[in-house]
Image (cartoon, rainbow, N blue to C red):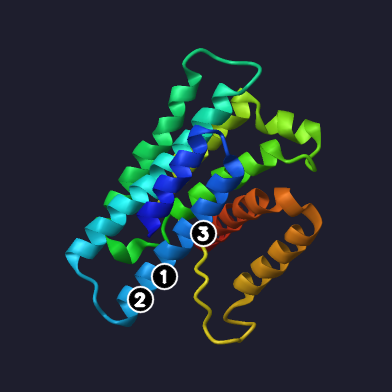
Amino acid sequence: MNLFCGCISIIFLQSKNFECSFIATLFSIIFDFLDGFMSRFIKNENQFGKELDSLADMVSFGIVPSIIVFLLLKTMKKKIPFFEWFSFFIAIFSACRLAKFNMNPYNNYRGLTTPVNTLFFSSLSIVTISSTVPLFIKNFIMSPIIIFFLIFFSCYFMVSKIPMISFTFQGFSWKKNKIRYIFLLISIFLLLTLHVIALPCIIIFYITISTYFHRLKNS
């Protein structure tokens, strides 16, 4: 179902229907999570399932974000010749990320996962077409330099060894889950105040605090 929703998302992107593509991507993420959860729950993790899951992820979380960025670059007022083709570096580095995970699945929380990366670009596409978002924010996002840096950091964090915050709660203790609780509270605040803009901001915040605590731990 993850792969099916990924294919549907691509079909919607062909007509630049970012809203429906975003919904299909959300379903891809949900089915990807449920698939992994059920496999672990019934203890039926076989090699065929892992390979199939990676191939599905490559479509839903590798090709989809590349096409989104490609379309955003194509619709820019200030175009740089052939610059839109750089968007497919996201697909290349997504493939590298998935290959690394297949080799060592225990490093799942190192680097930015492909579903989170896809959610970022998919939500960003919604921001660019939303009537409630101020024009200066749209113009800022649609700047070639900003898109270039987003592509660069997306590729970098997907294959980096920086451990991202795990949301596997260790009971309900504040002491053991302080970072998780703080992140959730700030995320809720952002959703209530920023609305459409909140989701990409939350993901940037997630990467930032993960990087900060990683550097703090190593210092």
Name the residue tied to disc 2: 38
Q: Is residue 21 visible?
A: yes
| Pointer 3 local density, CA inside 10 Å: few below 14, some 14–19, many at least 20 | some
| Pointer 1 local density, CA inside 10 Å: few below 14, some 14–19, many at least 20 | few
Secondary structure beneath dot 2 equals helix
The circle on residue 72 is none
Mark 3 or mark 2: whose residue is earlier in sequence:
2
Q: Is residue 143 above or below residue 16?
A: above
Q: Is residue 98 above or below residue 213?
A: above
Asked where in the image residue 2 lies, by quadrant, the reply is bottom left
The circle on residue 34 is 1
**Residue furthest left in the image:** 47
193 vs 109, nearest the viewer: 193
Task: Please provide percent x and percent y for residue 43.
Answer: 26, 80
Q: Which residue is at 44% across, 26% downward? A: 86
Secondary structure beneath dot 3 equals helix
Secondary structure beneath dot 1 equals helix
Circles 1 and 2: CB atoms closer than 8 Å? yes
What amino acid type is highlighted by mark number 1? Leu
Closer to the camera: disc 1 or disc 3?
1
Disc 1 from disc 3: Cα separation: 29 Å
Disc 3 from disc 2: Cα separation: 31 Å
| Drawn side of residue 46 relative to residue 170, left or right | left
Q: Which residue is at 30% across, 54% downward? A: 54
The circle on residue 214 is 3
Q: Is residue 163 visible?
A: no
Disc 1 from disc 2: Cα separation: 6 Å
| Drawn side of residue 174 relative to residue 62, left or right | right
Image quarter (top left, top right, bottom left or bottom right) of the N terminus: bottom left
Mark 1 or mark 3: whose residue is earlier in sequence:
1
What amino acid type is highlighted by mark number 3? His
